[in-house]
Amino acid sequence: MQDFILPDIGEGIVECEVVKWLVAQGQNILEDQAVVEVMTDKALVEIPSKYSGVVTKLYYAEGNIAKVHSPLFAMQVVEDDVAQKKPSESVKEIHNIEVNPANSVAPSHQTETNTAIKDTGKALASPAVRRLARELDIDLSQIVGSGDKGRVLKDDLIVTSSPVIEPITVVPLTSGGKRVEPIRGIQAAMAKHMMHSVFTVPHFSVSEEIEMDKLIETRAQLKPIFEREGVKLSFMPFFIKAMSLALEQFPIINSQVNADCSEVTYFDDHNIGLAVDSKIGLVVPNIKGVQHLSLLEVAKKSNELVDLARQGRLSSGHLKGGTISISNIGVLGGTVATPVINAPESAIVALGKIQRLPRFDENDDVKAVNIMHVSWSGDHRIIDGATMVRFNNLWKSYLENPITMLAMTR
């Protein structure tokens, strides 16, 4: 019998949330087979088994917090000729095993486990949805999810739990209720990180308007070419590539200062982060080495990162090593924002939505122009306002005249 100890995941992480068990008690598993999904402060991680054998006990229910270096599950290690049986045979055995909920977790977690087993079933749902289902006493396995791949959403639970009300029925209003939930996982990490950024980095902001007409035309021309390569082309790859080109001339924007402000580290690689509003909270994965990538390659990697982020499948490698970030509030309808620097980076830009607005031309005639408002935040310890304005002007010039950006691309 072997207890699988939750390993040190690194980066100072001491606990994680058990999101989903990928095996059941009594199941035959193979070495390196994924056993459980856990959410750390950084990302959703799959934990593999070190050995082949049979799972005998699950020490935590889904939604519980597991401590690093504590037993995660127990298994009976078996001989190679038994453990290496075909997956189809293992699956067949699983269906013939009756799981005893009382034995599936340690005594301190038994009450929560019985509930979790009742409402988890095979439904695909986030920990928050599972928690709400327990509060509403709803069996998730009986719910048809309206989300991606049948994922059960909170709205599905609300609709299910809502009583049928006749048109003439008067529903009394209630007030004073409240619910307290712990901040966990990536949301907790973001909260701590933002507090650190706000209180340790002296911010200053620079705002500007960018005329988008020529970029809109360029995207329209390139879009079918990218589609033939199976790549969706948004405006984001242009912003990313233009930023990388501008960083070549302003390396201080791609640098970081140490805690006591005695050293500045300049980075050759432009690892540009994208703020993504995912289902598990705000995450900022970054594209590594943008200075070496073509516009097509940037578009591919941007699409991949956004998809992984929205599925909660980012690795810690996707989140580490960023040197500068972009926050696109325009996709949510936002116009102007003052972004918070993603420390230890030194700069971040917020992109607003594109608006058709009147502007004067060189002859003082009014014309309609597609305008995007952008706002930069910089670390005032190492970046001054004049440098940020010059950097923004160069970045803006590439976006307003895309042909110059394409000419500069390696």
Image (tube, rainbow, N blue to C red):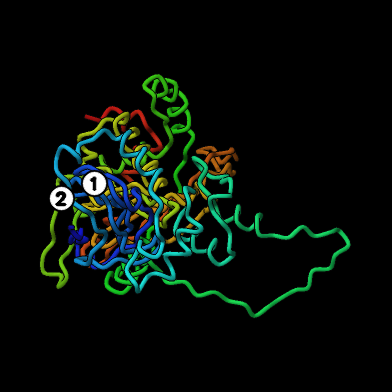
Question: x%, y% of residue 96?
Answer: 39, 44
Q: Is residue 179 above or below residue 347?
A: below
Q: Between 82 and 400, which is closer to the camera in this rendering?
A: 82
Q: Is residue 328 above or below residue 193?
A: above
* Residue at the extreme bottom: 176
Which residue matches tag 1?
Answer: 271
Question: x%, y% of residue 148?
Answer: 50, 42
Q: Residue at x 29, y 52 (%)?
A: 45
Question: What is the three-letter code of the residue carrying label 1?
Answer: Asn
The reply to whether callout 2 and callout 1 are in contact (CB within 8 Å) is: yes
Callout 1: helix, strand or loop?
Answer: loop
Q: Between 270 and 316, which is closer to the camera in this rendering?
A: 316
Q: Residue at x 17, y 50 (%)?
A: 77
Which residue matches tag 2?
Answer: 267
Q: Quadrant of residue 11?
A: bottom left
Q: Is residue 143 above or below residue 85?
A: below
Question: What is the three-letter code of the residue carrying label 2?
Answer: Phe
Question: x%, y% of residue 309?
Answer: 37, 47
- Classify mark 1: residues with Cα within 10 Å, few (<14), some (14-19) or many (20+): many
- Classify mark 2: residues with Cα within 10 Å, few (<14), some (14-19) or many (20+): some
User: Where does the C terminus fall, quadrant-wise?
Assistant: top left
Callout 2: helix, strand or loop?
Answer: loop
Let me know if residue 359 appears in the view: yes
- Indicate left or right for 104 with 323 as reference: right
Q: Residue at x 58, y 45 (%)?
A: 144
